[in-house]
Each structure stands twice: as structure tokens, then as C-alpha cells.
Image: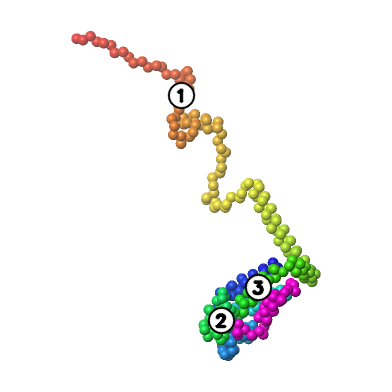
Amino acid sequence: MNEVKESLRSIEQKYKLFQQQQFTFIAALEHCRENAHDKIRPISSVGQVQSYMEHYCNNSTDRRILLMFLDICSELNKLCQHFEALHSGTPVTNSLLEKCKTLVSQSNDLSSLRAKYPHDVVNHLSCDEARNHYGGVVSLIPIVLDLMKEWIAHSEKLPRKVLQHVSEVLGSQGAAAATTRPAQTTVTQHLLGKLKYRQLAKESLKSRGKDKGFPKPPWRPPDKAPPPQTAPETSAAKLSASLQSGLPLGGSGHTGPVCRLPRVTSLSEERPIQTTPEFSRQPAS
């Protein structure tokens, strides 16, 4: 059931992109109708849109948007087949599934189909376009998506035995697909193994560089190379330098009082003590 929900969610994302380009889709249909000289008949089926794209589409932009519409319809048709293969269902789920299959068929008449609130795709059309030409084709996808959501909501209320049968069916289908394509699976596993080995090798190299703790420095031009690093000064060298220069041990940034050590001199360098001569007193005349 989770796979079914994921598939439906993927289709919804594609439809959101398509819905943003609704004016481009209407313009593409208008160009094809002009090239086919079919301005009276409304767009009444998916097969008509495909015929326009194959025979009367001369613009790459028109071809792209028409192909997007046809791809979404094709995925909805495949999802209906997936729903049908899941379980036998109840009358309610079977009725919803039949409606979906009928709507996405190539020859179903869409001219009377109109999407109602909360969908506003019809409101983006003019009165003439909504009434006569494009109201059905723009209402197809949102109505089918609503029916599929309702089908999933009813299927989730089924007993666990039925859901277990669903998982067994999916497992047998996966085993059958694996046996039909052994060569492709082997090649894919070989490529995945190579990619995984390369990724592990890169991660091991990165982890080795981190463990060493020596990251590679960034490249610099020769004229801006950093100066060579010198060995840090030891405490003894700092002490001797401070004693010789008379600076404090803290360096030039020290703001406290400076304590200068007295200079040690030898006996030969001792200077004689100078004495001031006494002035002789002269008798007064």
C-alpha cells in the first residue's frame, strides 16, 4: 500500500507542474485546432489530444505541454491496473476503480466532464472555452486523482488478511521480474559496487588526513609566503635577555613598576670616593 501511495504522490507532483502551465496547454490545443481546421468540434477525448500532437503540432513548446498531459494520463492508467492487481476489493472500491479506468481510456467522451470545488481549473477558462471546448479535458486529471484517493482510503479499511495477500502478490511479482532480468540486475549491482568502493576509498583518505592533524595549508603566491617559523624561546633565554636589557620579565607591555637589578662590578672597576675640599676661612681685613 505504501508503494501505491508513493506512486500517487509522484503523479500529484507532476500534475501541480502541469496545472501551473494551463494557459500554455490551452494555447497549444488552440494552435493544433487551427492547423487541423477543426475549430468547431470540442476536445472530447485523450485520443484526440494525442492525434493533435502527432499530426498537427508544429511548435516545440506545444509538443512539450501536450506530451506532459499524455504522460500523466498514461501513468494514471498504469496505476489503475496496479490497483486492480492488488486485491479483489469491495463493491465500493471496484466501482471507484471502474470509473477511473473509464475516464483515462483513450476513447472516453470528456465533453460533459466538469471539475467542481475545490478545483478551480474550469474557472481559469473563459465562458466560451469552459462551456464548449476545453472544460472536459482540463477536468479529467483532478477528478481521477480524487477517485484514486478515495479508493486508497477505502482500501486501508480492509482487514489485515487482505492486505497480507496484497504484499504476497507484490512479492511474487517482484520475484518474477527479477528472474526475467538477471543480466541487467547483475550489471547494475556491479556498477553500484564500484561506486560504493570509490566512495569508501575517498572517505578513508579524508579520515586519514583528519587523524594526522596536519591539514594542508592553502596555496599562496611566492611573494606572500609566510615567514619561517622559529623555535620558541625558553624561559632561561627570556630571563637572560631581560637581565641584560633591564626590562621586566613580563616584556614591554608590562605596566607595573620596573625593578632594575644593580650592576655587579669587579674590584678593579671600583671608583675612588670623591670628597669635596673644605674652603679655608680667611680672616677679615
Say which element carries label 1. loop
- Which is more N-terminal, label 2 or label 1? 2
Between marks 1 and 2, how big is the CA–CA gap? 102 Å
Q: Amino acid at mark 2?
A: Ile
Say which amino acid is labelled 1.
Pro
Direction from residue 258 to residue 227 in the image, left or right: right
**Spot occupied by residue 139 in the image (x, y as percentages of width and height):** 59, 79
Residue drawn where x is 44% and y is 32% of the image? 256
Residue 184, above or below 232: below
Q: What numbered label is drawn on residue 184?
A: none
Indicate yes or no whether the magenta region holds residue 98. Answer: yes
How far across and down, in percent of the image, does residue 230 sit? 56, 40
Residue 101 vertical placement versus 5 (above, below): below
- Check disc 2 and report the residue beneath it: 26
What's the residue at 70%, 68% (across, down)?
157
**Quadrant of image for the C terminus:** top left
Q: Nearer the viewer, residue 116 or 31?
A: 116
Image disc number at residue 262: 1
Q: Earlier in the sequence, mark 3 or mark 1?
A: 3
- Looking at the rendering, the stretch of residues picked out in magenta corresponds to 85-113
Label 3 CA crowd tier, 10 Å (few <14, some 14–19, many 20+)? some
